[in-house]
Image (cartoon, rainbow, N blue to C red):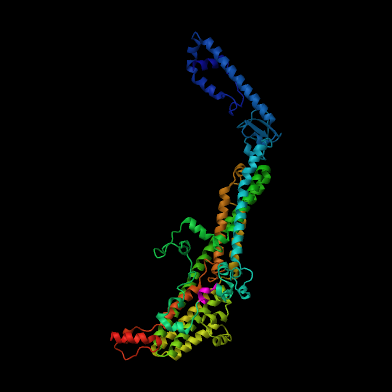
Amino acid sequence: RPRATAVRASGALPQQMPQGMAHGHGSCPPFFLALLATAASPCTSAFRASPGARGATLEINGSLAKTQSLYTLSVERNTKQCAEIKECYCTKGTPCGWCDTYKEARLSNRDGPADAKNCPKWITWARECPVLYCSTEGKEAEMWWWINCTWFPFTCFLTWLVVYTWREVLRAQHLPHFGIAEESAKAVSFATGHAIGDHTFVSHISEDDGLSHVERQNRDFFGPKRSFEIFRKGLQCPTNERLPNGASRPFELNLSDLSTHPGENHEKSRVGPHKIAVTLRIAVQWRTALGATLVSATGLMCMCSLFLLVLRNCARHLNRESYESIALVTRELQAISGSLQNAVNFLLSFYALNRISWFWQVMSACFMLQGRSHDLGMICGAGARRTTEEEWKARYTLYRWIMLGFFFGLQPFAPRLRFVGYTPLIKCGLLESAEAELLQGAHRGPGTIAESWIANWIQYHLTGESRQQAFNALREFRSAIGTIGDLIEERAPVSFESLLYVTVYALCMILPFGPSHIDYEKREVVMQNPHNATVLGVAIICTFYLALLHMLRHLQAPFDDIGAPNDALNPIALMNSTERKLRDYLSTSPPPALWIGTSEHPPQGASSLDVKVRSKQVM
């Protein structure tokens, strides 16, 4: 304190130091020295009276002169450095500012230029420059800049190219092969217009097996041969003559079915593990909603990354006014995408919930149709007589007609069955040639004729309460078929559906050009940041909306296993299950215990001899 007071008293302290000191370009600010001098004022008199005051003053004056000399050299060096700068953004990382009025760099402090020369358009910070580009950075810095800008768009383009090639390979595998029968070309997807093409059947089944392409596609149903002799054997029918226990695909596929490996125990649990890797593998399969939208989603991701690449270069090379115009358009697109997203969320949530509920109603109607078929078989099997061979043939005829009614009821809604003629049905034993000629004259469809035949059968072969219950079951059987047709005909109005599609497509096209969570006003941040997370977010949002739209479109055809093989219902699995149960109801003889204590006689015929013998043994 005494030394500081002496310096102040001796007049060695300069009255005003350059302003560069205050901006951090010098060694010590003057206000700090003045503060020390003021604090030491009470000791000034004592210091002047000391013997060594004169020597201390000279020593401090020498230190200040040295400090001032170093400061002067620093100011001269910084001034020379500023004089060499010819562009505004080149002042970044230097003690210089930019005078946009005279287009020159000067030594700067936080209030303006360090010198006394006035500059109306003074730029203190480099991020406020009109152009955020410095041509003197060197070729290496320029190369790293372009590498930082282009590596992510290039990766997005490679991702799109790989996904596009992969999906084209899957498309070639699942589309029809050349040389398929002409009638199979008519069977197309109701939702996509794609023709039937199952490469597994075509490659693994010989062409000389005598089956048409339609029969190969539906081998689970048309493969087994039905005959009265096999039907008459009942429970004694050998295994090789029985109907298949199931179909190649269940009535409805779920994640548990697709995620369970062949070697695992299916009886252990109906709930699969649903691991992330397994679920993703299933989600990207052919014609699954997520997999079907991958090409479009990756294309939009590539488009967004290219747009941000252009925006980063605009922030770097364009002047402030031009960039602000582009940023304003981008912010407006961002606001539009936000409004569209609210509208899409409302429309999709309403439509999706109703469509999923509608899909479950179609499934319930199919199960209702199966149940009414079982009721017909159970009531007619118990009410009709089975004592003579002719009565057994009448049972077999009813069995065929019920299956024909079931088949014709679902045929118009399944692309694989829609154009099946009468020949495959005759070959598999469900239809006779004389009956086929009658069906060809139907005014509306063969299903109506089959239902009429069943009603006549009930009228001629049943009596009393059995006849009444059978007619009730037949009425509900016909009602279930009509319900399925009515549900499938329920579609959204064209105006609503087109509005939904246009809104979703518009949102997905605008999102890449108005990504959220980017502050476009901060040009330097926009220029330096690659915004990878933003691009991935745009891709995920577009994937979700497009996949949901794809799923809703294919749910309109619930039996369309060509357009959506993993989501479609398999009517053949339902028909096979129904047919096996009908055989149990109609071709089985009652047990011997049923005839004990009654005046009725056991059924007559070749297969009932064992029943008589066992009946006598029990008695």
Q: Secondary structure of the magenta portion, mostly? A: helix
Q: Is residue 406 visible?
A: yes
Residue 343 visible in rendering: no
Expressed as whole percent of the image width and height from the top left, the position of residue 21 reads 59, 26
From this view, report whether residue 157 is shown above or below residue 232: above
Q: Residue at x 52, y 17 (%)?
A: 4
User: Residue visible at 54% across and 22% down?
Assistant: 34
Q: Quadrant of residue 495?
A: bottom right
Q: Quadrant of residue 420?
A: bottom right
Where residue 5 appears, as percent x and y from the top left, is 52, 16
195 above or below 43? below
| Residue 408 falls left or right of residue 330 | left
Magenta stretch: residue 222 in it?
yes
Query: Which residues are the magenta region?
Result: 217-223
Point out residue 527 in the picture as x, y percentages from the top left corner: 62, 43
**Can you say whether 384 is above or below 107 in the image?**
below
